[in-house]
Image (cartoon, helix red, strand yellow):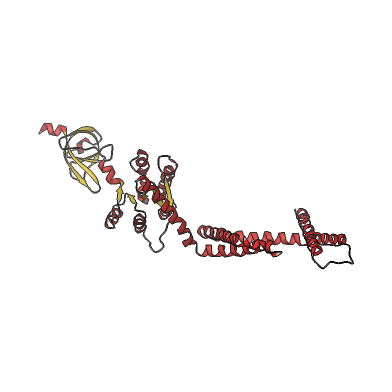
């Protein structure tokens, strides 16, 4: 490898020596005492020897510098690297536009683009790394505007997903059914909270977090909906619920959640909310007093003699006098239905007891 490097740098040195000799011979001051061919030969040989001597040293310095640069970059956050890269590209574009008229300057016109490009590229890199938040927020806002334009054209507002509704999992079936129109928006701070839950030391929380990530991955791969990860954060706000409300206001979107408290906060701020629990309660089969049902009594109730059964949708049925039927499937007669914030509860009595009365 060292020999290859020596040969390459010797060839580069010889070429530069030839170009140097050509420049000397093209000037008005010419050496009359020496043959031009000897002058070209001296420059070529001198350039080749210089390349042989300097090449390995430059390569070792370059490799060492690259290793240090990689070590430093690995410690930098991703946002800082992205901001620096964007600033570097912007700096190079500005340098290119500036150097276009400077190319006509004789002699130095060929080297000015390189010098100006390095200077502006370095300045853009430094500014981009220091102003990464402002720079990235510009692209985030442009992404938000594109989402808003698309939903205005389609007439459907964006649906901003909360952490609870992603973990719940029913959002995947709802979007598949086509009841939710418009793009689904997952803010970056919600995704970050979901990752923290998935990395929790508590087994139950960790499983819930991983389930949420799986659900989100599943929705992204489906063709029936579009999911946008919105890399927008509010450093001045600490609560995720407050950030959701502010983002919903800026995007004129609706918050999709299962959180009762977030639901109330959104209503206070005038933000539209889609609550999955309310939807589930709304689509449950209607049961009226006097109807007959077949249920399987599985456990005791809170009051003496009561038994508890459940419908297929999870609705709890309290059977008065049903304790004696635990473990059996019996017919019951609905006596009343109670609707609460947590869901619906049905009260019933065994049909056998009704016949006895």
Quick one: 323 or 60, which is closer to the camera?
A: 60
Q: Is residue 231 visible?
A: no
Relative to 110, is 274 on the left or the right? left
Instruction: Estimate the x, y position of residue 310 in percent, counting from the top left.
Output: 25, 39
Quick one: 167 or 311, which is closer to the camera?
A: 167
Relative to 350, is 79 on the left or the right? right
Quick one: 115 or 280, which is closer to the camera?
A: 115
Q: Which quadrant, please, contains the C terminus?
A: top left
At horizontal 55% and vertical 65% (from top left) the residue drawn is 126
Q: Examine the rendered structure and indicate whether residue 31 appears above or below residue 254.
A: below
Q: Quadrant of residue 233?
A: bottom left
At horizontal 57% and vertical 61% (from top left) the residue drawn is 94
Relative to 70, is 136 on the left or the right? left
Q: Examine the rendered structure and indicate whether residue 353 appears above or below residue 230.
A: above
Quick one: 224 or 287, which is closer to the camera?
A: 224
Instruction: Estimate the x, y position of residue 290 in percent, counting from the top left.
Output: 15, 35
Q: Quadrant of residue 59?
A: bottom right
At horizontal 57% and vertical 65% (from top left) the residue drawn is 123
Q: Is residue 274 visible?
A: yes
Task: Specify the farthest residue to the bottom.
Answer: 29
Instruction: Estimate the x, y position of residue 254 in percent, counting from the top left.
Output: 33, 50
| Number of marks in picture | 0
Relative to 87, is 338 on the left or the right? left
Instruction: Estimate the x, y position of residue 334 in percent, counting from the top left.
Output: 17, 37
């Amino acid at each position: 490898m060292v020999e290859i490097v020596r040969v390459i740098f010797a060839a580069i040195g010889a070429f530069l020596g030839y170009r140097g000799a050509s420049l000397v011979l093209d000037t008005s001051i010419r050496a009359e005492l020496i043959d031009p061919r000897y002058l070209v030969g001296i420059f070529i040989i001198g350039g080749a020897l210089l390349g042989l001597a300097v090449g390995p040293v430059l390569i070792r310095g370059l490799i060492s510098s690259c290793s240090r640069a990689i070590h430093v970059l690995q410690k930098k956050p991703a946002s800082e690297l992205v901001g620096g890269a964007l600033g570097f590209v912007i700096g190079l574009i500005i340098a290119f536009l500036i150097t276009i008229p400077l190319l006509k300057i004789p002699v130095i016109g060929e080297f000015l683009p390189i010098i100006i490009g390095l200077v502006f590229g370095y300045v853009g890199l430094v500014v981009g790394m220091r102003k990464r938040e402002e720079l990235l927020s510009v692209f985030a806002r442009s992404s938000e505007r594109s989402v808003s334009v698309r939903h205005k054209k389609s007439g459907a507002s964006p649906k901003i997903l909360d952490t609870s509704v992603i973990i719940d999992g029913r959002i995947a079936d709802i979007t598949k059914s086509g009841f939710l129109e418009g793009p689904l928006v997952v803010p970056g701070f919600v995704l970050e909270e979901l990752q923290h839950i998935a990395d929790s030391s508590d087994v139950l929380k960790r499983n819930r977090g991983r389930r949420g990530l799986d659900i989100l991955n599943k929705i992204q791969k489906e063709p029936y909906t579009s999911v946008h990860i919105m890399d927008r954060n509010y450093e001045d706000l600490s609560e995720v619920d407050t950030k959701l409300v502010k983002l919903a206001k800026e995007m004129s979107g609706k918050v999709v959640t299962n959180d009762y408290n977030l639901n109330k906060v959104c209503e206070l701020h005038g933000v539209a909310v889609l609550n999955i629990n309310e939807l589930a309660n709304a689509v449950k089969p209607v049961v009226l007093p006097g109807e007959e049902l077949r249920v399987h009594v599985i456990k005791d109730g809170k009051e003496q003699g009561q038994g508890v059964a459940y419908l297929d949708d999870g609705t709890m049925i309290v059977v008065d006098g049903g304790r004696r039927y635990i473990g059996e499937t019996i017919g019951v007669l609905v006596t009343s239905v109670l609707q609460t914030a947590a869901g619906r509860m049905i009260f019933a009595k065994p049909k056998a007891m009704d016949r006895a009365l």
